Amino acid sequence: MIHVLTPEQKIAEHPLLLQRVAALEAKLAWFQKQVFGGGKSEKLDVTQRQLDFAGVDQVRMAVGEKNREDHLRAQPKARTAANASGNLRACPRD
């Protein structure tokens, strides 16, 4: 059997339901803070945001240049008739 509330019962129950919702929202906020953290550890303070990174770009460019040179040196040499068949010995002279 379904229990139907009268309008007076609904009006009387409304503040209780609001309190219950507020308590559940507080519990949910606490749970989310426990699981996902408070968020403060991820924030940077003013001094961390003002660090000087002037030399970083120069280092990145130097490393990039070095990596590019290594890549160019590592290119395979053109295959000749002597090593095309997989024979690494020199071709006999006629």
Image: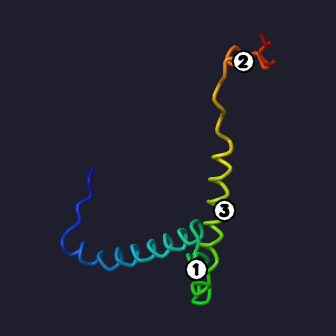
**Residue at position x 58%, y 80% in the image:** 40
Q: Sequence-wise, which precedes: disc 2 or disc 3?
A: 3
Q: Amino acid at mark 1?
A: Lys
Judging depth in this view, the residue of 92 and 62 nearest the camera is: 92
Q: Sequence-wise, which precedes: disc 1 or disc 3?
A: 1
Q: Amino acid at mark 3?
A: Val
Numbered mark located on residue 63 in the image = 3
Badge 2 crowding class, 10 Å Cα cut-off, few under 14, some 14 to 19, many 20 or more, is: few
Numbered mark located on residue 40 in the image = 1
Q: Cα distance, mark 2 to mark 3?
A: 37 Å
Q: Amino acid at mark 2?
A: Ala
Q: Is residue 8 left or right of residue 63?
A: left
The residue tagged with tag 2: helix, strand or loop? helix
63 relative to 13, above or below: above
Judging depth in this view, the residue of 47 and 35 nearest the camera is: 47
Residue 60 position, x and y percent, is 62, 66
Looking at this view, name the residue that lies furthest to the front. Answer: 94
Q: Is residue 47 left or right of residue 24?
A: right
Q: Cα distance, mark 2 to mark 1?
A: 67 Å
Q: Is residue 77 left or right of residue 32?
A: right
Numbered disc in front, either 2 or 3: 2
The C terminus lies in quadrant: top right
Badge 3 crowding class, 10 Å Cα cut-off, few under 14, some 14 to 19, many 20 or more, is: few
Residue contact between numbered discs 2 and 3, judged by CB atoms under 8 Å:
no
The residue that disc 2 covers is: 82
Looking at this view, name the residue that lies furthest to the left. Answer: 7
